[in-house]
Image: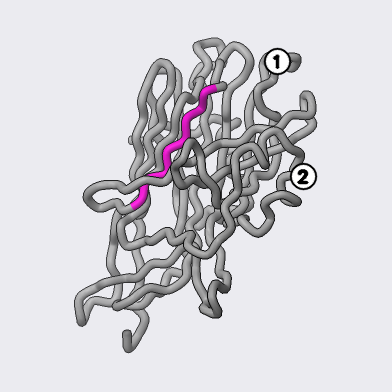
Amino acid sequence: MPAKLTHGAVALLLAALLVPLAQAAEVTQKGNVQVAFFGKLTPHRLPRKGLAPVRVAVGATIAPIDEAGPKPALQKIKIEINRHGHFDPVGLPVCEYDEVQPATTADALAACRESLVGKGSFSSRVLSPEEAPFPSQGPLYAFNGTYHGHPAILAHVYGTQPIPVSYTIPFILSKAKGAYGTALSAPMPLADSESGYVTGLTLNLGRSFRFNGTRRSYLSAGCPTPKGVSVAPFDFARATFYFASAKLSSTLSRSCKAKPGS
């Protein structure tokens, strides 16, 4: 049976306004780490054949089970999206990492607004304010970009507490295997439980735009159910969280509904 969410995790889950909590989170724990992973795909009704624009929302909350025990220093996160969901950045401007890091939110948007593909939220517990590697909380702005030569989503956060600081998480895009088509992998090189640790993260991705006179979508998906079957369950997303002391994985199962006549 899943463990109960701690009070801190519940508060963060309820605060994640960009990811409606109509569906339950998957809760896993190991050692002194507890993670709640949640997400959804909208719209729910999609074409049986072909693709339609969609939005993908994913998020997680992280907390120590025992506050007096080791802190959960997140070193890497990997999120895999079902293979019937497609990322297509062709036609979008590319944002470079050094254009948004370091930068305030206003400066990051001034440099890369045309590359914006989503928003979200970020939270952390800062233990050493004078050495804070990231803000305690703030809105995330996700930009279509590159990182070390690879296509990426640059998730930028800026906050003023405990000190003014920005932090950019590079989610590198690559091909996944099996039921999953795209993997988003983000290293957390500044994760250090002595100075602080990440406690929450949400991303709500999706954008429509025009390129060469054609309407395009950054994210699209279909619901390829057999004739006569209107609802199809599927593994929507799988997340793996790498900590200094543990590795936790969680899979979200969701369903889609085929549009009538499609």
Q: In the image, is 220 to the left or to the right of 68? A: left
Rendered location of residue 130, percent (x, y): 75, 14
The answer to whether residue 4 shows anywhere in this view is no
**Does the magenta segment cover residue 180?**
no
Q: Where does residue 49 sit, x and y in percent of width and height?
A: 29, 78
Residue at 66% across, 35% down: 101
Residue 133, image x, y percentages: 65, 22
Q: Which mark is residue 107?
A: 2
Q: Is 121 or 28 nearer to us in this picture? A: 121
Of 162 and 40, nearer the camera is: 162
Q: Identify the mark nearer the N-term, 1 or 2.
A: 2
Does residue 160 lie above or below 197 as drawn? below
Q: Residues within 10 Å of mark 1 (few under 14, many from 20)?
A: few
Q: Residue at x 42, y 67 (%)?
A: 220
Q: Which mark is residue 76?
A: none
* Mark 1, secondary structure of its residue: helix
Three-letter amino acid code at the position of disc 2 = Asp
Real-space Cα separation, disc 1 to disc 2, in angstroms: 23 Å
Above or below: residue 51 compared with residue 91 = below
Q: Residue at x 64, y 44 (%)?
A: 140
Q: Would residue 8 be visible to someone looking at this image?
A: yes
Q: Which region is colored magenta?
A: 182-189
Q: Is residue 160 left or right of residue 173?
A: right
Q: Residue 147 appears at what percent x and percent y?
A: 50, 39
Rate crowding at label 2 as few (under 14), some (14 to 19) or many (20 or more) other CA atoms within 10 Å. Answer: some
Which disc number belongs to residue 131?
1
Amino acid type indicated by mark 1: Glu
